[in-house]
Image (spheres, rainbow, N blue to C red):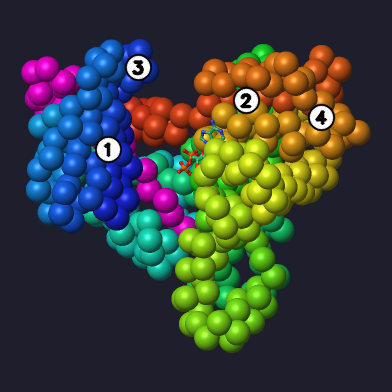
Amino acid sequence: MKVLVINCGSSSLKYQILDMSTESLLAKGLVERIGMDGSVLTHQKIGLDEKNVVEATMNDHKEAISQVITVLADPVFGVVKSMADIGAVGHRVVHAGEKYSASVIINEDVIEALEECIELAPLHNPPNLLGIAACREIMPKTPQIAVFDTAFHQTMPPESYMYAIPYEYYEKYSIRRYGFHGTSHKYVADRAAYMLGVSIDDLKIITCHLGNGASVSAIKRGKCIDTSMGFTPLAGLAMGTRSGSVDPAIIQFIAEKEKRSIDGVLEILNKKSGMLGVSGVSSDFRDLEEAVKDGNERAALALQVFAHRVRYYIGAYMAEMNGLDALVFTAGVGENDTGMRDVICAELGNLGIKLDPVKNRVRGREAIISRDDSRVAIMMIPTNEELVIARDTYSLANKKIGLSRGV
Ligand code: ADP
């Protein structure tokens, strides 16, 4: 079965199509500027060097998905004969609240539940729902599956997910820690167990998803027991442009001093803080490292703040799990930034975390990068959120097809 994986943003749409008989990627692409002037689709068939760039008016997500399907069936750049060749569609959905702790086949009830979650993820869930609606319209007979960023974290115990605020706000407004990047944390934890040749049920793992958005999770016996993001993806680590956790009283203080609304301050904490805010240079770690080489002290400080926060969570989660077997780095920074991995691990030797500077020079492939005498295995594992989405989609679509055949 060929599975199409869709990740819809407000004006963009990323997709991949995989052949699930071999779990191989056939093609991937990106649509940008949906609903704006200059909409463009960039498509790449795996194995072909040349990319197919389609500049066409795409007024909404439905038109964007129609273009994606056209290019997927293109005689040169395509990988399917027709739309009917797509066995199922998997949608990345950011927030499922407390409703779903696993992926689901989309039906009217699911849509309704996700609409109720819009207020929990006002930036993310609406475009996710637009993508779902467009695919259901264009491919009404194809099973559509939702895979949630929040689902993997639903195993957290109440003491991890409850905020110490009046309980009624949890009851009335569902205010609690949810956590995000769940498919990535799950994927790399499973891979870590596989690489170590140990059942995940016997492992305590900390997964560091360090990208533009960044989060750390504590995974005990395969279940997430804590994670650094919270009610929203603003909490926890310092990130590219996000502050991560701050003293909440700062919000009112900045609002007063800078004459801004609460929304205005949250915008600053989301878009003008983190690495960008501290350094004044960039949100991109590569730019910061270049600036450090030129002697920029604030760029150096930003990177130190980032590493400090990651170490802080590693220590906290080791205490929560009473030990650690594997520390995993993934996502843009975690996979590529050998220097940052080095700085994070530098002061952790007494906790049994000892990085091997030579093995650490790895990029782009899975590797164990700790010294032989390190009690904790330090690992670099490229994430693959699309594969997790495709696997769940494949397995639920098979169930649906089985049920409809009365199997
Ligand atoms: P997201 O999916 O959250 O947008 P990614 O996981 O793709 O983010 O990570 C993107 C970030 O990874 C970039 O902003 C950049 O800072 C960092 N990055 C990518 N390559 C490198 C590299 N070679 N060295 C350092 N940082 C890198």
User: Of helix, strand and loop, which one carries label 1?
Assistant: strand
Gap between marks 4 and 2 measured at Cα: 14 Å
Gap between marks 1 and 4 measured at Cα: 39 Å
What residue is pinned by disc 3?
24
Q: Which residue is the extreme one toward the right? A: 350
Asked if residue 80 lies in the magenta stretch, the reply is: yes
User: Of helix, strand and loop, which one carries label 3?
Assistant: strand
User: Given the image, on which type of amino acid does mark 2 rest?
Assistant: Met
User: Given the image, on which type of amino acid does mark 1 rest?
Assistant: Leu
User: Tag 3 or tag 1, which sits nearer the N-term?
Assistant: 3
| Callouts 4 and 2 close, C-beta under 8 Å | no
Magenta segment: 72-97
User: Of helix, strand and loop, which one carries label 2?
Assistant: strand
What residue is pinned by disc 4?
353
* Quadrant the N terminus occupies: top left
Q: Does 258 sit left or right of 297 as displayed?
A: left
Residue 287 location, x and y as percent?
54, 42
Question: Residue 298, located in which quarter of the rendered image?
Answer: bottom right
Gap between marks 4 and 3 measured at Cα: 34 Å
What residue is pinned by disc 2?
380
Residue 30: which disc?
Answer: 1
